Image (tube, grey):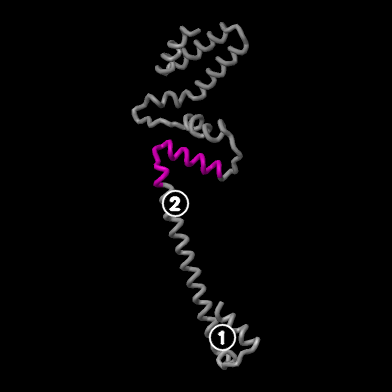
Amino acid sequence: MSHTTSIMWSYINNGDKKNFIKLTNAIISSTETDMKKKAVQGTKRYILTNWEGIMNQHKADYAGCSAEAHVSHIFSSRLSSRPLGWCKTGADQMARLRVFAANGGDIYNLVMKKKKILRTEVRAMEVDKEIIRKRKMTISNEKLGNLTLLNIGKRSVASQFLKSVRGA
């Protein structure tokens, strides 16, 4: 059967679907074991299912697609060949990161950009908290400043409580 391999490739590369089908049918009928017949039938089915994509690679504007290579080489190398427990979010992030790196992305720069964005967000949250704290102080001081109990020098449980609230 190895002598038919080059003939099969020539049919595929020349887009000769009719002769490809004839050749695979001849190989299937001359194959003795059921297991090998199923293997050839599976290969035939795979090629015929993907025939349009195979033919597209001969077009001048064909850009190609590495989806199958990404799945088998990039994803599975981390997500299935050395399987770990993954939550959906973690598996999604790991897959995206591996594809990013495989497409030539710089992971260090990506991490540094994310850190910079996170620092900016944290600073903005701290500023927001400080503004809210100052507003609370302004509002509470105005109300607490009007209380006579705080303005006279007398120390009582009520005055100490209100002074502690004012300082919070």
In the rendered structure, which disc, 1 or 2, sits on the residue that comes first in sequence? 2
Amino acid at circle 2? Lys
Residue at far right of view: 157
Please report contact status of discs 1 and 2: CB closer than 8 Å, yes or no: no
Q: Where does residue 131 sit, x and y in percent of width and height?
A: 48, 72
| Residue for badge 2 | 114
At a point 51% along the width and 39% down the height, the residue shown is 95
Residue at far left of view: 60
At a point 43% along the width and 39% down the height, the residue shown is 101
Amino acid at circle 1? Leu
Q: Compared to 44, does 4 lie above or below?
A: above
Figure disc tally: 2
Q: Is residue 107 magenta?
A: yes
Q: Where does residue 160 sit, x and y in percent of width and height?
A: 61, 85
**Which secondary structure class fits the magenta region best?**
helix
Q: Is residue 61 left or right of residue 162?
A: left
| Residue for badge 1 | 144
Q: Compared to 64, does 147 lie above or below?
A: below
Q: Is residue 122 left or right of residue 149?
A: left
The magenta span reads: 90-109
Q: Where does residue 82 sit, x and y in percent of width and height?
A: 56, 33
Q: Is residue 161 left or right of residue 52?
A: right
